[in-house]
Image (cartoon, coloured by chain):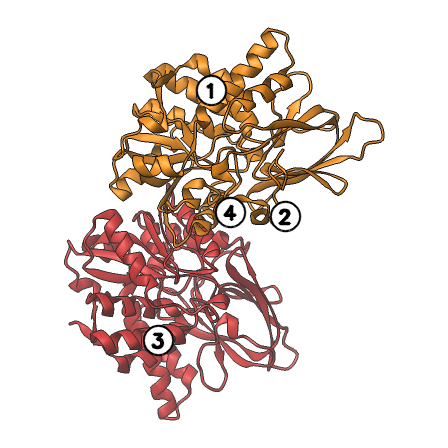
Chain colours: A red, B orange
Amino acid sequence: MSKLITTDDLDDLAVGAAILGTGGGGDPYIGKLMARAAIEAHGPVTLMALDELPDDFGIVACGAMGAPTILIEKIPSGEEMGRALDLYVRYTGRTLDALIPFEAGGINSTIPIMAAAKLGLPVIDADGMGRAFPQLEMETFNVYGVPAGPVAIADERGNTGIIEVKSAAKSEWLARGLTIRMGGQAYIANYGMDGATCRRVSVPGTMSLAFGIGRTVREAKAQHRDVLTSLIDFFAGTHYEEARIVASGKIVDVARGVKNGWSVGTVTIHPFQRGAEPVRIQIQNENLVAEQGDEVLAIVPDLICILDLDTGEAITTERLRYGQRVNVLAVRVPPIMRTPEALAVFGPKAFGLDQPYRPLGLVA
Amino acid sequence: MSKLITTDDLDDLAVGAAILGTGGGGDPYIGKLMARAAIEAHGPVTLMALDELPDDFGIVACGAMGAPTILIEKIPSGEEMGRALDLYVRYTGRTLDALIPFEAGGINSTIPIMAAAKLGLPVIDADGMGRAFPQLEMETFNVYGVPAGPVAIADERGNTGIIEVKSAAKSEWLARGLTIRMGGQAYIANYGMDGATCRRVSVPGTMSLAFGIGRTVREAKAQHRDVLTSLIDFFAGTHYEEARIVASGKIVDVARGVKNGWSVGTVTIHPFQRGAEPVRIQIQNENLVAEQGDEVLAIVPDLICILDLDTGEAITTERLRYGQRVNVLAVRVPPIMRTPEALAVFGPKAFGLDQPYRPLGLVA
């Protein structure tokens, strides 16, 4: 049964999207405002489950590309996502029956809702990352055989581009080049596919997951229950299954910069537990690996979420500050994201990390 | 009356194109080989004068973009120019009746001939720069009102792009970004226009000019006449009119690098004349300004050509070496390139130079 996304759902979605953003994906607040304005103007958006999807539906993935640190000062005009989709359709001649987020985190959970409201299209309850990742080829769409090109790209000033590529890695390389020259933030549409393919290659239920995470946080607060315990219980009932707190402490150092169009850096957390070694988290837009001494606490593609100790809400990379008190929540990704093919594209090695992937809570 | 370009013409063209390249435009040798192979396979190419051009002809400008220093090691496959043109036509829906070089120097005199041979189209005896310039907006097409976009771009590996832009400067910025990510050398098609427009906005006769320069050098050598005097006499009979030797000496220093996708640097020449101050030439792909102490000997858009003392042939930026004996030949550009509108786009200020433009041989 389809669900209608109304403005009432957007607060929950933003909270959930920030957690699935694992530090990256862009501040969901901006995306929430854009989605709210679009729903107010054009009405609610249908959220369509993968198993409702007609085989011959024309589907295109969409979202924002860039460095989250730039997004907070380079505000979208609201027209760019529609321009990229329009260009994609015009160039490929495909029909557009539904949109799918290419990423289930940060601003990219809400950007497709905004675009869908304006176009009168449904949004699919799934995505291509199951979280946020920093690179365009890090998609289950790519892992399971959907070509990454053509890629349509648009900025907030009306400049656009279409790229045709020989590999998904090249789509990242060339679209990133344009994104950088568009000022570090742009909007893209790609991975066109039909409904039957979409069912096979997508991480299912991730929009519902984001709504559920947000609802869990909200209800726990209203009922004065512990937010983290509630979240861990919530994940246990989903296909993500396993979530744990891997560190609690105070942020004592944030080293952060923009490199090659990404926000990169390291955050150091001094645990509350007396005598415990500091926890270091490496960042490339998203949190990649959490380590304590020689021990890997959690590693990509599993989610590493830095949550405010008081509110339980995610702190995105660009908002990390010295002195913040935080919990670090790790979440295991579902099986479709843990296959050897998937790990080759977005496992530790794909980020230049030497540590092997060990799924959270599973013995190797 | 149309002329047919055969393989016999290509040696003259390469020599002329190197001089019009004013140090840049890419080594014409590679372009000559590509044009030769295409003419051998597909037959000679018609060179069409501007005044023969039907008003409703569909015309597209084309050529290579990148750093000449990279071109000599990153050899074209020969297919990329055709791919960019094909993409341009497919995307815009325009008809393609003739090609025009966007630049009359270096590899970009011969690349359009190669593409025209393969497509069975004429090449127009004109261009948009009247020489070589390092940036895509530095075109009389742009100066006199033809939109720079869309721009089609292709690399030698089969990756392509189409860019739509709000300004000619943005076409340079975004296409350069893609060119850099394509490895520093790519092939572009843009400035689509009709025949009537083309007649109004182009620098006329520049292909014939290149042939004439090459023929002049060849005949002077065969008849043991002085190459430079012959060249100066030849230019006097064209719409370029004024050419002079502004320096003769030995290269004593070459500082050169690749920056933002261009070859940039400075060459220092120690004049043969005893006690004369050294002559410095600033480079951004092309030679921009020749100075001796406080005196400006020649400045962009006028041509500054570094010629081998013995052969009279141009030495491109990437081939400059310590110890070379050279003449520096300056040539005044025709009136269409000296209007205030033109100088705003490719005069000294457009290159960040403080010195004012003084047309060679004309009192200010």
Q: Is residue B167 left or right of residue B283?
A: left
Which residue has dot 3 on it?
A32
Label 1, label 4: how far apart the Cα atoms are: 38 Å
Label 4, label 2: how far apart the Cα atoms are: 16 Å
Q: Secondary structure at mark 3?
A: helix
Which residue has dot 2 on it?
B353
Mark 3 belongs to chain:
A
Label 3, label 1: how far apart the Cα atoms are: 57 Å
Mark 2 belongs to chain:
B
Nearer the observer, disc 4 or disc 2? Answer: 4
Q: Report the residue at 48% width, 52% height from top.
A: A350
Q: Amino acid at mark 1?
A: Leu
Label 2, label 3: how far apart the Cα atoms are: 47 Å
Q: Amino acid at mark 3?
A: Lys
Q: Where does residue A230 sit, x and y in percent of width and height? A: 38, 83
Q: Can residue A203 be seen by looking at this rendering? A: no
* Discs 3, 4 touching: Cβ within 8 Å: no
| Circle nearer the N terminus (4, 2) | 4
Mark 4 belongs to chain:
B
Front residue of B50/B320: it is: B50
Mark 1 belongs to chain:
B
Nearer the observer, disc 1 or disc 4? Answer: 4
Q: Name the quadrant containing residue B234.
A: top right
Front residue of B251/A80: it is: B251
Q: Secondary structure at mark 1?
A: helix
Which residue has dot 4 on it?
B340
Label 3, label 4: how far apart the Cα atoms are: 49 Å
Q: Is residue A273 left or right of residue A189?
A: right
| Circle nearer the N terminus (1, 4) | 1
